[in-house]
Structure formats: structure tokens, C-alpha cells
Amino acid sequence: MTYISFALFSTFSIIWVTSLWFDVQQQPRLGHHWYIYKLVMLTNLNFVLDVFYSVIVVMGYKFDRLKRIADFMHFTSIFPVGIVTCGLFWGLYAIDPALVMPDWIAKLIPWWLNHITHTYPIVYILLDSYFHKRHAFF
């Protein structure tokens, strides 16, 4: 790949990692102290998957084995879970915002983190599909 795509996906990876750091360090965990309890929600599961995937994509520029793992992850988890998560969130949000997030929770989550978890995955998946030719075999 080119230096431009490497720089672009390195930037994406930095955005993912710093957003996850903020979520782990700064966001409240209602009823639990461990972050792992937040993974029961599809949004947070997709968030963590995307963070790991973005790091693997960047490291895949150097290591061919990681590129093949990224190909496998793209087709088995990243694409389907990302599309479903974002589609469900914005579909339900268009009907009634309280269906996906009551007002008291919306006050706890910054607007930018909400977009990182519900809009950014679609943008990332589309750009990843455009810049990287993924193979459906491992």
C-alpha cells in the first residue's frame, strides 16, 4: 500500500485507541467497576473489535500474517457487526432517540464518543474496503 493509506489508517487507529482509552478511563460504569461488563452491549463489543482491528490493519502493512488475520476479521466480525450496530442505532434513533439512549444516559456520554461508536465504524469500514483488497480466505 501507499504511504498515504498507511498514514490514513495510522491516524484512524490513533483515533480508535484514544477513544477507547477515554471510554475505559473517563466514562462511568453503571453498577460495575470492571470495563468488561460494558461488553454486553453490541455497541461496546463493536467498539473494542474495531480498535483491535485498526491496530492489526496498521501492523499488517509490515507483517503479512497480520494482513491475513485482518482479512479474516473483516469478513467474519468487523463488517457484519459494524453494519448492524450502526444501522440499528441510527434506525432506532431516527424513530425515537429515547429508544437507544435515555436522556440521563445521553448526558453522561460526550457527543463525539457517541459518533465514534455509531458513525465512525461505517466510515472506517467503507474506507478500509476501498483502500485494502480483502480476501475471503485465511
Image (cartoon, grey):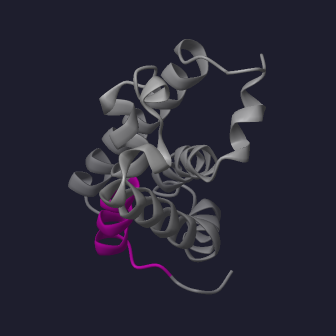
Give the total of numbered labels.
0
Q: Quadrant of residue 92?
A: bottom left
Q: Is residue 51 above or below residue 113?
A: below
Toward the viewer: 138 or 112? 112
Residue found 66% across the figure and 21% down from its top: 29
Query: Would you say 73 lies left or right of 50 here?
Result: right
**Outermost residue toward the left?**
4
Toward the viewer: 80 or 90? 90
Q: Is residue 45 above or below residue 110?
A: below
Q: Quadrant of the C terminus?
A: bottom right
Q: Position of residue 125 (x, y in %)?
A: 39, 64
Query: Would you say 114 lies left or right of 43 here?
Result: left
Residue found 27% across the figure and 48% down from its top: 8
Residue 132 sits inside the magenta stretch? yes
Q: Quadrant of residue 74?
A: bottom right
Q: Position of residue 17 (x, y in %)?
A: 49, 32
Query: Would you say 14 lies left or right of 51 here?
Result: left
Residue found 37% across the figure and 47% down from its top: 97
- In the rendered structure, which segment of residues is drawn in magenta? 121-134
